[in-house]
Image: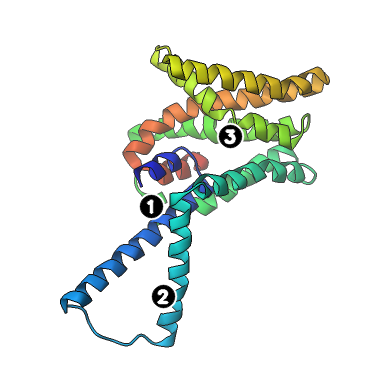
Amino acid sequence: MNFTHKILSRNSGAWLILYALVQTSQNRRRGRDTREADERLGTGHQQVPDLAIRRSSWAWTKVDAMMEQLTSGWLLLTVPGLIWGASFLFMAEGLRSIGPSGVCFVRICIGFATLGLFRSARRPVAPAHWGSVAWLGLLWFAFPLSMFPFAEQRVSSALTGMLNGANPLFATLVACYLARRAPSRGVAVGLTVGLAGTVLIALPAVDSGHSSAIGIGLILAALISYGFALSIARSLQQRYGAVPVIWRARLF
């Protein structure tokens, strides 16, 4: 589960909801194992569950099975990836009604309201770190979430989503820059291949005209902002957890 938590701590929204479901499923599984052990030892309470309890148990058994699949295979990456990728399509649709600034505002509000449903979102954060959380809100949400809608007025949502896949590359580059340390040979090779692929994806749009080139520039600015945000978020999330930090960052 440490691998799952490491992945989820770098994202928000769908990742955090999925993580909460996984945790709930695992807690129920632990409780069921404890009850079964008590019954084998003769310490459990013998009682016949009524129909409602049996139905609830059957439903949670299905949820447990689904969560076990999610935590043991590619679905853990695929499902949030589809949700995350589909956001660029929804942005393109939203631009027809509320414009770029409206899309950014609605995305932040929906994320803030969703994370607010979790009790862990209200864990306290020391006032000494409020400044870092505010910077996180600017660099992870306000600025990049504004850049993407403006970019989609000039390039397609599909291209925007594909270029956003370069997020780990820019996060690594920014981390190396802040640490004043060159990446290892293996990491450097990976960065070179990844950046070459990013250029090949963006090149046709750049050649198609000045407006498309501006759109690519806006996307790259958002990715650089993400890189700095992830560097700030790491220490905050390790100290306070992902949910309270991201919830407050959206508020700022």
Residue 124, given in percent of the width and then of the height, sits at 34, 46
Q: Quadrant of residue 30?
A: bottom left
Q: How is the image coloured?
A: rainbow
For mark 1, give the secondary structure. Answer: helix
Residue drawn at x 40%, y 39% as measured from the top left: 6
93 relative to 232 in the view: left or right: right
Number of labelled discs? Answer: 3
107 relative to 212 in the view: left or right: left
Mark 2–mark 1 distance (CA, rounded to whole Å): 26 Å
- Give the number of the mark in front: 3 or 1: 1
Mark 3–mark 1 distance (CA, rounded to whole Å): 23 Å
The residue carrying mark 3 is 142
The residue carrying mark 2 is 57
For mark 3, give the secondary structure. Answer: helix
- Give the number of the mark in front: 2 or 1: 2
Residue 145, given in percent of the width and then of the height, sits at 62, 35
Residue 215, given in percent of the width and then of the height, sits at 73, 25
Looking at the image, the residue that sits furthest to the right is 209
Residue drawn at x 64%, y 23% as measured from the top left: 198
Name which residue type carries label 3.
Answer: Ala
Mark 2–mark 3 distance (CA, rounded to whole Å): 43 Å
The residue carrying mark 1 is 120
Q: Who is closer to the viewer here, 57 or 157?
A: 57
Q: Residues within 10 Å of mark 3 (few under 14, many from 20)?
A: many
Residue drawn at x 63%, y 18% as measured from the top left: 196
Residue 131, given in percent of the width and then of the height, sits at 42, 30
User: In the rendered structure, are the residues bearing label 2 and label 1 in contact, judged by CB atoms less than 8 Å apart?
Assistant: no
User: In the rendered structure, are the residues bearing label 2 and label 3 in contact, judged by CB atoms less than 8 Å apart?
Assistant: no
Sooner in the amino-acid sequence: mark 2 or mark 1: 2
- Report whether residue 125 is seen: no
Q: Residues within 10 Å of mark 2 (few under 14, many from 20)?
A: few
